[in-house]
Image (cartoon, helix red, strand yellow):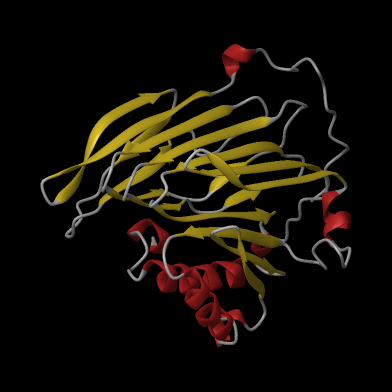
Amino acid sequence: MFAPPVPAANDPLLPAYVRACGGVRLRFGKVGARTHRLELAESGGYRARFPTTFDTTSEAVLINTGGGMAGGDAMRVEAVLEPESDVVITSQAAEKVYRSQGSDTRIETNLTVGAGASLSWLPQESILFSGARLSRSLTIDLAADARLIACESVFFGRSAMGEAMLRGSLRDRWRVRRAGRLVFADDLRLDGAIAETLTRPAIAAGARATATLLAAGPGLAERLEELRLLFGESAFAEVEAGAGLVADLLLIRLLSPDAQLLRRALVTLLGHLTGRALPRTWST
């Protein structure tokens, strides 16, 4: 699919009132033996729904009623987990980021995980169309003994439809603090001829899909050895995977030439890390 060069205009080509802006704010706490939703605020076309769970966790599903995002759209997600709560946050579907006329599409996520709390941040993939300009940030504040599994994945075009992300922009920023101290900082910037850039051996060697996972909790050194054995299984046959310890966190990177192969590997990996089935939205 052809896409002309994408301008990086300082002034938006479309007025702000025709762009989507909103988000979701959540707060969870433990009441008795179970985790419950204590606060919900929604704005714009963004919603959260809460499927019934049959254990002590609470699950939230983020929904974009607009069906996708374009240049100039902005979404903000905030979630606070009070001490000892156990929460899974996912999304209803992949987030589609469409071609921009110059302005960035902005997604900002801020997560706070209290003492003894556990968060699984498991949104489905972001699909970037040719000409998309995505600026995304993920900020996580962890208590000293909080547990975390966070996953973000990006597909560069819909390969099953014969599409590629020829040009565009991606800026992806992670900041993780443990007890107020910065323990992980990661920035990715791709701009211009992205399809060509991804062919370079030192960047992606032709990969069309990528994922980053971060885990915090006890026993990570032992889990690292388990993961390296897992990477030898058939689900990872065509997926390049690597894992290592950074500060007190377990960091995993995945690259794949095919989006569906990456998703299959993610399902296997996340099931292994969480020890439970993924949210139902991942299989619908």
Of 81 and 73, which appears nearest the observer? Answer: 81
Residue 171's x, y, as percent? 72, 40
Q: Is residue 266 visible?
A: yes
* Quarter assignment of residue 159: bottom right
Which residue lies at the image location 39% right of the left edge and 36% below the top edge?
Answer: 79
Q: Quadrant of the C terminus?
A: bottom left
Of 178 and 60, which appears nearest the observer? Answer: 178
Residue 197's x, y, as percent? 87, 55
* Quarter assignment of residue 253: bottom right
Residue reaching furthest to the left: 32
Residue 231 is left or right of residue 36, and the answer is: right
Residue 175 against residue 232 in the figure, above or below? above
Residue 156 is left or right of residue 153, and the answer is: right
Count of numbered tags: 0
* Quarter assignment of residue 278: bottom left
Of 18 and 77, which appears nearest the observer? Answer: 77
Of 248 and 237, which appears nearest the observer? Answer: 248
Q: Is residue 129 visible?
A: no
Which residue lies at the image location 26% right of the left edge and 47% below the top edge?
Answer: 85
Which residue lies at the image location 53% right of the left edge and 30% below the top edge?
Answer: 75
Residue 98 against residue 89 in the figure, above or below? above
Residue 115's x, y, as percent? 33, 45
Residue 281's x, y, as percent? 38, 56
Residue 156 is left or right of residue 125, and the answer is: right
